[in-house]
Amino acid sequence: MKYKTYNIVILAMLMIVSLSAQEMGDILIKNGTVLTITDGIKENTDVLIKDGKISKIGKNISASGIKTIDATGQYVMPGIIDAHSHIAIDVVNEATDPNTSSVFTGDAVNPFTISIYRALAGGTTTSHAMHGSANAIGGQCETIKHRWGVMDPEAMKMKGAPRTIKFALGENPMRVHGEGNSIIPRTRMGVEQIFREAFSKAQVYMQEWDEYNRNPNSGKLPPKYDLKMETMADILRGEIIVHCHSYRADEILMLVNVLRDFGVDKICFQHVNEGFKVAPELAEYGAMASVFADWWAYKFEVYYSTAYNAAILTKNGVITSINSDDAGLIRHLYHEAAKTQRYGGLTDEEALRLITINPAIQLGIDDRVGSIEEGKDGDIAIFSAHPLSIYAIAQQTIVDGIVRFDINNDTDDMRLIIDPEEKIDTYIEHIHEHEEMDRCMQDVFQFFAHSHKH
């Protein structure tokens, strides 16, 4: 009996290991127009992926015994990257404290979220599963690969991706804490003090541990371990990239000044709707910006922006991306990038960089994804037309050399059981019933619902 139990335990462990393994594939893509992003456009060119990595780029590549895709007349580009998303996680906000840097969205990854497959249908292969914007200092985030079909949450995570954390400015932390719970911060100046106090405490925490570690046998007790302070200390050490929800130019400059005072230089501002007002200052500090193409005016602090924002930031030397912050828009990031050609006149390469190599840089993963280069991950999107064309439709999306979306061969409603009797909630009802959702965009949906009724 003991022997049988032992075998069952071993079998279970092997199953866990196999589920956690990140599957890699081999594919040869033939005769496509390859948009490398970093090395120009290559006509009638092949891309060979072996063991999940881009092995060779060139003409007339041959490889026997592996899957071959004929991309004649089609466009082959790097998988699209979304630097601001909330898909594939079961919870978004831990809104119980102005500083929740101890929590981690990676603990709530849900590989069965249908939005993953829908993102693949738009050529998006990587996204940044972010904590919400309820807190001035929110939780740590997870960079995920869209490996649709895996059952283990760990297999969704992009191993080795740098750590990131969510900060937030303005109305959101003010509403959740000051107005909702009568605790700091109630005002914008209170938000600033949350940052300054947390960083100052982290400095003291680091000093106490440094003193103890220099002489651990002194007989003194070690300092009390504090996961929040450990996280803040790692930000000060440069081990975590800050991604900050932001809108107003004055607050953006405020956080730049705070970070400068504490020696933190890894910062990407999210939304940053008034970034165009302070683009030279952002560029000088080395701050990055991840923006909407043309969303604003959905709440008071976002009353003023411009569709030229991404172009102005780009022309001023700010590493800029366009993100979705939405489970639907993530399928259309190539359309969002194209808007910068109408509003700002960006070149094809500049526009495509906004959804490929630039968000990769912002997430610290540009050595692995964001362009088609030998040695990089085999993450590829194949389109029927140039991806900046309104007529472009994603045909196949490949992650690590494995086709995860195929417009012609995937079955209708694949992996999704439809109940014709099921009540489908509206998005507004969903917002009210699921408070764990990030409420960053709440008023835009209320506005659209009100307009529809009238």
Image (cartoon, grey):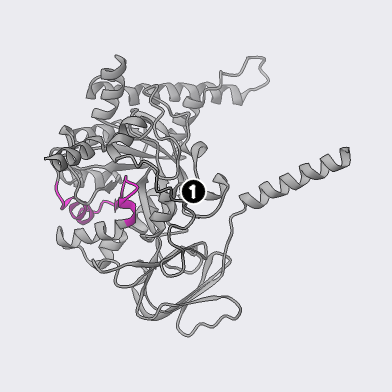
Residue drawn at the location 35% of the way across and 47% of the way down: 327
Q: Residue furthest front?
A: 421
Q: Is residue 73 magenta?
A: no
Point out residue 65 in the picture as x, y percentages from the top left corner.
61, 78
Which quadrant of the structure image shows residue 97? top left
On screen, residue 230 above or below 387: above
Q: Which residues are magenta?
A: 306-331
- In the depicted view, which residue is nearer to us: 49 or 230? 49
Q: Residue at x 24, y 44 (%)?
A: 282
The residue lying furthest to the left in this view is: 454
Query: How far across and how far down the image is residue 103, in percent?
Result: 47, 30
- Which residue is painted at 32% across and 50% down in the image? 328
Does residue 261 appear anywhere in the picture?
no
The N terminus is located in which quarter?
top right
Residue at numbered disc 1: 161
Whole-percent x, y for residue 287 in the image: 30, 44
Along the line of sight, the residue nearer the viewer: 239 or 10: 10
Q: Nearer the viewer, residue 398 or 110?
A: 110
Q: Is residue 32 above or below residue 331?
A: below
Q: Secondary structure at mark 1?
A: loop
Amino acid, disc 1: Ala
| Residue at figure coordinates x 62%, y 15% from the top left | 221
